[in-house]
Amino acid sequence: MSGRVRLARLTDLAALGELSRLSQQEHVDARSLGLPVSGPRIGVFSLFRLPLGAFRPNDLLFVYEDERRLSGLLRVERDASRDEMTIVELDAIGSGDSGDTRFRLVQHLLRDGTKRGAFRFHVACADGHGNVELFMQAGFARYGQEKLLFRRAGERLPQAWTEERARDAGIRPCQPHDSLPLARLYASVTPQPVARLEAYRLNDWERQGSTTRVPRSSLAPILRFADVEAYVLEEAGSAPGALAGLLQVGVAREEQPHYLKILAKGGADVAPLVDFGLGLIGARVAKGGSCPDTGVLAPVRTYEAPIDRRLEEAGFAVLATVTLLMKEAVVRVAEPSLVPAVR
């Protein structure tokens, strides 16, 4: 291949919008991450109608140019607080060359991202079009799968809960001092290899709210277009401060689906959290304005069952299962510890 990878320019906007749109269709020569989103498919283009829109200073957009024609794009979000990059969009169009185009884009990102100080690279993709094979060839490790559940727009949402009802159920807003109980909650429900890879710190759990990305999900990019709130479910009959569940609610400000994420201990009844979260979204939608009724998305990892069953009971249906992959750009070493000294 004679093309080259470069950073996108403002003059590329129109061409990239069309490339992104075509890549989300069932095109014979198109390749994308295949994330489902709205309608029959929730393509990244439907989430980000303009590829350069809502960009932040640390975000990156690379393009593949061949003979003055753009045939590939790679969009990345940077979490500067954790030195991580998330691949949001990886598209290519071309006669038989789309796979090579995407591989070159990924390789360029790994080199460039390492120079910029990124330690981890994340991606979520559908297991099709050679997606998983592409990333594993580039050194990514597959560490989990998520079910994406969707509650269609137009379906009646529950009534918003009163403060008294929420208090009686043990549901309250998340506070920074909940960071340690949240870390313990996460460790109790997450397999140790996954927890070791994601490597959350206490200050990550303290950031629950408008900028939260913890716990990570394949749909984290839509939180950029949502007002995010976090609530906890206190564990009845346990020590003060112990938590049985975490609820994240993202109310969309744009034409994107709303977001619901639940983390809970095994055996905890999460039905109240689901109803509370949907009621919160319903209250925002009922006010109108910038909160349209666009449906609700909920990601659930396969080891987090039976949360998916409670969501299905509330009107959600499974859209797809996506694969989570990650690559570390640093070598882990054993943490130093104190040992007895003999003199």
Image: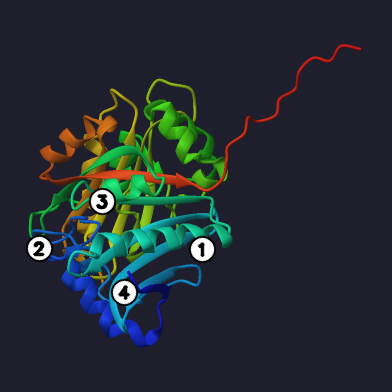
For image coordinates 38% across by 46% down, the residue present is 216
Instruction: Point out the tag, 2 or 4, that comes first from the N-terminus.
Output: 2
Q: Nearer the viewer, mark 2 or mark 4?
A: 2
Which residue is label 3 attached to?
A: 131
- Residue 260 visible within the image: no
Q: Are marks 3 and 1 in contact (CB under 8 Å)?
A: no
Which residue is label 4 attached to?
A: 51
Counting other residues with Cα less than 10 Å from the Cα at mark 2, is it few (<14), some (14-19), or many (20 or more)?
A: few
Q: Are marks 2 and 3 in contact (CB under 8 Å)?
A: no
- Residue 68 visible within the image: yes
For image coordinates 29% across by 61% down, the residue present is 100
Question: From what the image shows, is residue 247 above or below residue 91?
Answer: above
Instruction: Point out the tag, 1 or 2, that comes first from the N-terminus.
Output: 2
Q: Position of residue 149 (x, y in %)?
A: 17, 46
Q: Are marks 4 and 1 in contact (CB under 8 Å)?
A: no
Instruction: Locate the N terminus by quadrant.
Output: bottom left
CA separation in Å, label 3 and label 4: 21 Å
Identify which residue, 52 or 329, lies in the foreground: 329
Left or right: 153 in relation to 170 = left
Which residue is label 1 attached to?
A: 112
Instruction: Point out the tag, 3 or 1, that comes first from the N-terminus.
Output: 1
Which residue is label 2 attached to?
A: 26
